[in-house]
């Protein structure tokens, strides 16, 4: 609930004027609706009374009927304005929420970033934001506008008809509505959480079924996995059924509340007329106004049923949105050495110790190869140097300053890491490269492509405009590897960390690429996690991690 | 389960949509009947109110208790009918959605390769969130459409009975609404299609950026990427607003038409009651009761049309889902042999022979014979079909032509499952299920995986995991190194002592020590008597086999 409130405050802070105006307009719409029906009822009844009394000729028909026309047209116009205003404001707020979410994830701790990979998490993040558009549009604004309308109508009815009728209407709608809303959310919040979990289970089991189709078939588990996925959907269906049932009851309760209050007003009105305390036309006014006020509680049904989902989405989203980073003065790079001093490490996502007491130094212009069997901690060490993974003991310093004390932008400008697996986004070759250095001219791009031996390959296609599909589609494994290496080189770092840089390249190309890399960055200190002889033999020194 | 016709190109959109809706049709029709009945109770309530308020003017004897109770009782019946209708409509929606899901699951389980429609992400998005859009269509749009067919007609008939002038007002203003809606609908449809396409693009963009988070951060490209995304998101908002403006405008115009209609009825009734107008009724001047009744009916004449317009968006998104469903069902692939269920092992020697098999690429394969207990390496340049041959032996895909014989019998839909019960399978890139490591190793075949882990030289790695066998691994083995994940796959393949082992590139990308450990593990199985077939580039591994079969010629 606090998360929900936090998201609403964020939305409000983004678009305060538009939302306040929207709230005022929604209130105007409700008021005009109540006035329209009330006035029409009064007008007809009063006209009938005048007609029966033979006073038809002197009855003022023009002012009330002009008022009716004004209210009818004004209400439609106000509703249009209110909808455009609040939707536009909400969409703007959600847009900035999306951007902030992405901004928050880009600086999230590394282990969390690893878990974010995978289509499921991605779907959640897009769907969650979509759910949140209801916070302002379907929850807060309608409730506020409804309350304001009730308060104003209360005063008017008190003045025109009397305290008893006014109190009956206000108490009925506000108290009754509140009771129904609270009852409804108590049930549905829990149900919607469980239904959501079942839907997630279905999705993940279906993904397993599709991705692991062959493995499952050979192991004779394909049918079982299908049943397993459908079982999750059956569970979701049962929970959804209960949820729908609760929502229907809420809807019926709200409808009955409106009928009950209108029936009560009718009864009070007739009694007062028969006692001679009220004109029939005013009794009609009270009854019709009460009918129109049902519109103030109608949005509660949707609000109550969506509340659970919105609260969950708000909780997840508010965890990830960006906290503005403190901006510190960037540390000046002096070209000092990278020093690893008695470092011990643990694997990411576990407590398994890998390295212990490792020390070495890499100076400007020097290349160091890390060797050791898979699992010996080569990649983890590179992550630590790049500031993405904490050291368990010892120190890693650059220019004499521990890596953990560097601020993010400065560290990124002096240290660049080519991870084992890199993702390519769709776009052209130039787009891909300019991601690393937005201001590079074409000549620089061709230089770096020359260094990684991609010039011929690309010249045979569309040059820098060669299109790359999602996930690097259209490039072979080796080409993609060289392109992401080129991207890292464009950062022109002081310390270059390469994790198995020549994976997927034949030996001659691998050697040429490493030599090209050195020509492009003659002064960088290079640390290579080497798993091939060609990488280890390129280096000036090797450090064995066993 | 639905079995809609899948006739390929001529599978038109409309036919598909109707077929997908079949499982809920009955409930949907009954829901519509109840929705109409509930709406038709309003004239009764209106009559009661008109009788009471009119009676107050004419001095008739009106009992406040009876009027209030009658009004509330009719309201209660209306609420009950409404609940019943919604309940039926929701049942219909659940049936349709569940049947479509079951259909997607069962078809995806039969495919031999990924659907051209898209990967696991897009199919699961279709089967989960997108199918849910059909619910709103079935519950809201369908019921509004049913009411539009009946309710305005009934109210029109009631109006004709009391006053031809009021009926005339309805007759003139009513049909204008659908005409106008059709015009707006055409404009809105185009805007909406543009926006739907944009939703897809924006989500794909976000998905791409989210899967490249680490790279973006390492390249210091946060600002560039965020600015680019922000511009795209801004465009998306503008398009969405364009669609919404059209939708809001159309409902505003509807509301105006309705308001003008009601106002005209009110003015006519008001002047008639004052005695200023004396036409429009069938003889007698209008009584207050009739006047109030007609006024109460007027808004209800327009209400179903307004509901239908409000639910228009549901129809548009349902149409988009139907289009995707028909695209999905049109995307045909080859099927697996058998069903992939558990079966008792096929009887016969653990031998394999391929006779005159043609690969999907068109290459003709030399005949292959592997005897029971033999160790065979399949070698050849990349792309010649080593992996495909292993898949054909496992019945995961059928050759274009030719025969695969296993245990002396032809491999077909009936023998595939029993044959696979004898196979240990070690794919090149394993997919780890979203379950514990124990489940991933044993896959429900109850025995303790300790022995297999020992043979694959991976026991210590598992013991060092924070939760041991209960650890949940990432999809591609995140949390383990590449070599460790490979040895886990080996342990999975040899768990349960199968007598045929098929391994695809078991030592690729491994350092020498790990490759040796994996090779030892495989050879131990052969020593036990199992038939071993490995597809490999690794000449060290191939040298340890009895013989090498070259696929696509010796390179």
Image (spheres, coloured by chain):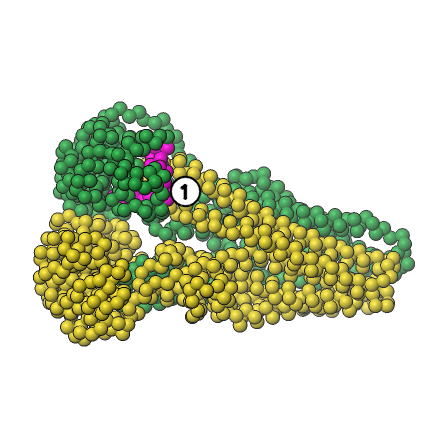
Chain colours: A green, B yellow
Mark 1 nearby-residue class (10 Å; few <14, some 14–19, many ≥20): many
Q: Name the element at disc 1.
A: helix
Quarter of the picture holding the N terminus of chain B: bottom left
Spot occupied by residue B48 in the image (x, y as percentages of width and height)? 74, 67
Percent x, y of residue A232? 39, 64
Q: Chain of mark 1?
A: A
- Vertically, is B463 above or below B11? above
Q: Which residue is mark 1?
A: A102
Magenta stretch contains residue A25: no
Closest to the observer: B212 or A231?
Answer: B212
In this rendering, position of residue B311 left or right of residue A378 = right
Residue pictured at 12% horizontal, 68% vertical: B371
The reply to whether residue B347 is in sight is yes
Q: Residue at x 34, y 51 (%)?
A: A118
The stretch of residues the image draws in magenta is A416-438
Q: Position of residue A257 (x, y in %)?
A: 63, 61
Q: Is residue A542 left or right of residue A77?
A: left
């Amino acid at each position: 609930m606090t998360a929900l409130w936090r998201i609403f405050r964020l939305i409000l802070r983004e678009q305060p004027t538009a939302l306040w105006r929207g709230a005022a307009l929604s209130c105007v719409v409700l008021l005009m609706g109540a006035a329209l029906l009330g006035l029409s009822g009064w007008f007809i009844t009063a006209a009938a009374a005048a007609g029966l009394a033979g006073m038809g000729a002197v009855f003022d028909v023009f002012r009330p009927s002009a008022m009716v026309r004004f209210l009818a047209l004004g209400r439609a116009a106000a509703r249009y304005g209110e909808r455009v205003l609040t939707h536009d404001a909400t969409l703007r707020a959600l847009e900035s929420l999306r951007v902030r979410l992405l901004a928050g994830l880009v600086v999230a701790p590394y282990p969390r970033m690893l878990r974010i990979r995978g289509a499921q998490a991605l779907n959640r993040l897009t769907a969650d934001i979509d759910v949140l558009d209801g916070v302002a549009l379907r929850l807060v604004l309608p409730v506020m506008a409804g309350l304001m309308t009730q308060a104003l109508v209360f005063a008017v009815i008190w003045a025109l008809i009397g305290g008893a009728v006014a109190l009956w209407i206000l108490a009925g709608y506000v108290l009754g509505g509140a009771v129904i809303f609270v009852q409804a959310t108590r049930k549905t919040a829990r149900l919607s959480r469980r239904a959501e979990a079942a839907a997630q289970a279905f999705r993940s089991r279906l993904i397993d079924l599709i991705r692991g189709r062959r493995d499952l078939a050979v192991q004779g588990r394909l049918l079982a996995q299908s049943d397993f996925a459908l079982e999750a959907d059956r569970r979701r269906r049962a929970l959804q059924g209960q949820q729908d049932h609760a929502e229907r009851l809420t809807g019926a309760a709200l409808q009955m509340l409106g009928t009950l209050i209108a029936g009560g007003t009718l009864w009070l009105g007739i009694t007062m007329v028969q006692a001679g305390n009220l004109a029939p036309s005013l009794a009609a006014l009270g009854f019709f106004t009460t009918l129109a006020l049902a519109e103030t509680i109608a949005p509660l049904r949707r609000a109550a049923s969506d509340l659970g989902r919105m609260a969950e989405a708000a909780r997840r989203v508010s965890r990830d949105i960006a906290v503005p980073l403190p901006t510190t003065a960037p540390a000046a790079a002096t070209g000092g050495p990278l020093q690893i001093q008695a470092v011990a490490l643990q694997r990411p996502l576990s407590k398994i110790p890998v390295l212990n007491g490792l020390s070495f130094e890499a100076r400007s212009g020097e290349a160091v190869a890390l060797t050791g069997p898979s699992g010996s901690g080569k990649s983890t060490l590179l992550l630590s140097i790049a500031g993405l993974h904490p050291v368990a003991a010892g120190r890693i310093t650059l220019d004499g300053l521990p890596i953990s004390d560097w601020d993010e932008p400065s560290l990124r400008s002096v240290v660049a890491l080519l991870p084992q697996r890199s993702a390519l986004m769709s776009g052209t070759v130039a787009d891909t490269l300019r991601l690393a250095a937005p201001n590079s001219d074409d000549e620089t791009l061709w230089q770096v492509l020359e260094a990684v031996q991609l010039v011929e390959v690309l010249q045979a296609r569309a040059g820098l405009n060669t299109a790359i599909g999602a996930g690097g589609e259209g490039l072979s494994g080796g080409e993609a590897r060289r392109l992401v290496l080129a991207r890292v080189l464009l950062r022109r770092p002081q310390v270059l960390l390469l994790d198995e840089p020549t994976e997927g390249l034949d030996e001659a190309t691998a050697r040429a690429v490493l030599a090209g890399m050195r020509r492009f960055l003659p002064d960088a200190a290079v640390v290579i996690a080497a798993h091939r002889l060609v990488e280890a033999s390129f280096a000036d020194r090797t450090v064995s991690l066993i | 389960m639905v079995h809609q016709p899948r006739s390929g190109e001529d599978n038109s959109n409309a036919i598909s949509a109707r077929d997908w809706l079949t499982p809920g049709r009955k409930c949907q029709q009954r829901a519509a009947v109840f929705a109409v009945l509930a709406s038709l109770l309003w004239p009764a309530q209106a009559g009661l109110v008109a009788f009471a308020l009119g009676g107050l003017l004419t001095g008739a004897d009106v009992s406040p208790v009876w009027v209030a109770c009658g009004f509330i009782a009719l309201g209660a019946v209306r609420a009950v009918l409404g609940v019943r209708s919604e309940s039926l409509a929701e049942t219909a929606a659940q049936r349709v959605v569940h049947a479509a899901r079951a259909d997607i699951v069962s078809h995806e389980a039969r495919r031999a390769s990924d659907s051209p429609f898209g990967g696991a992400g897009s199919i699961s998005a279709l089967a989960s969130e997108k199918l849910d859009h059909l619910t709103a269509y079935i519950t809201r749009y369908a019921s509004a459409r049913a009411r539009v067919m009946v309710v305005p007609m009934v109210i029109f008939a009631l109006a004709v009975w009391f006053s031809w002038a009021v009926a005339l007002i309805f007759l003139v203003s009513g049909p204008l609404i659908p005409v106008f809606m059709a015009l707006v609908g055409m404009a809105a449809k185009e805007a909406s299609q543009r926006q739907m396409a944009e939703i897809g693009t924006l989500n794909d963009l976000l998905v791409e950026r989210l899967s490249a988070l680490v790279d973006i951060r390492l390249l210091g490209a946060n600002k560039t990427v965020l600015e680019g995304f922000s511009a795209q998101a801004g465009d998306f908002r503008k398009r969405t607003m364009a669609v919404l403006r059209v939708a809001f405008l159309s409902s505003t115009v509807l509301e105006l038409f309705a308001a003008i209609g009601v106002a005209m009825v009110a003015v006519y009734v008001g002047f008639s009651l004052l005695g200023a107008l004396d036409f429009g009724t069938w003889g007698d001047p209008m009584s207050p009761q009739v006047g109030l009744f007609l006024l109460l009916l007027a808004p209800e004449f327009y209400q179903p049309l307004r509901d239908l317009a409000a639910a228009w968006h549901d129809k548009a998104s349902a149409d988009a889902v139907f289009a995707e469903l028909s695209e999905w069902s049109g995307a045909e692939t080859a099927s697996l042999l058998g069903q992939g269920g558990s079966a008792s092992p096929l009887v016969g020697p653990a031998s394999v022979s391929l006779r005159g098999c043609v690969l999907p690429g068109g290459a003709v394969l030399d005949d292959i014979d592997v005897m029971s207990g033999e160790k065979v390496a399949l070698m050849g340049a990349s792309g010649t079909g080593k992996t495909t041959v292993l898949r054909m032996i496992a019945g995961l895909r059928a050759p274009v032509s030719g025969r695969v014989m296993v245990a002396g019998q032809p491999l077909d839909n009936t023998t595939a499952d029993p044959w696979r019960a004898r196979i240990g399978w070690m794919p090149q890139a394993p997919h780890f299920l979203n379950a514990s490591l124990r489940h991933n190793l044993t896959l429900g075949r109850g025995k303790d995986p300790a022995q297999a882990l020992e043979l694959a030289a991976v026991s210590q790695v598992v013991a060092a995991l924070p939760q041991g066998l209960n650890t949940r691994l990432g999809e591609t083995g995140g949390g383990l190194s590449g070599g460790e994940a490979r040895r886990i796959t080996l342990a999975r393949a040899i768990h349960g002592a199968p007598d045929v082992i098929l391994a695809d590139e078991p030592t690729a990308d491994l350092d020498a020590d790990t490759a040796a450990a994996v090779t030892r593990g495989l050879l131990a199985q052969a020593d036990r008597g199992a038939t071993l077939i490995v597809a490999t580039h690794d000449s060290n591994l191939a040298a340890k086999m009895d013989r090498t079969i070259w696929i696509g010629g010796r390179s």
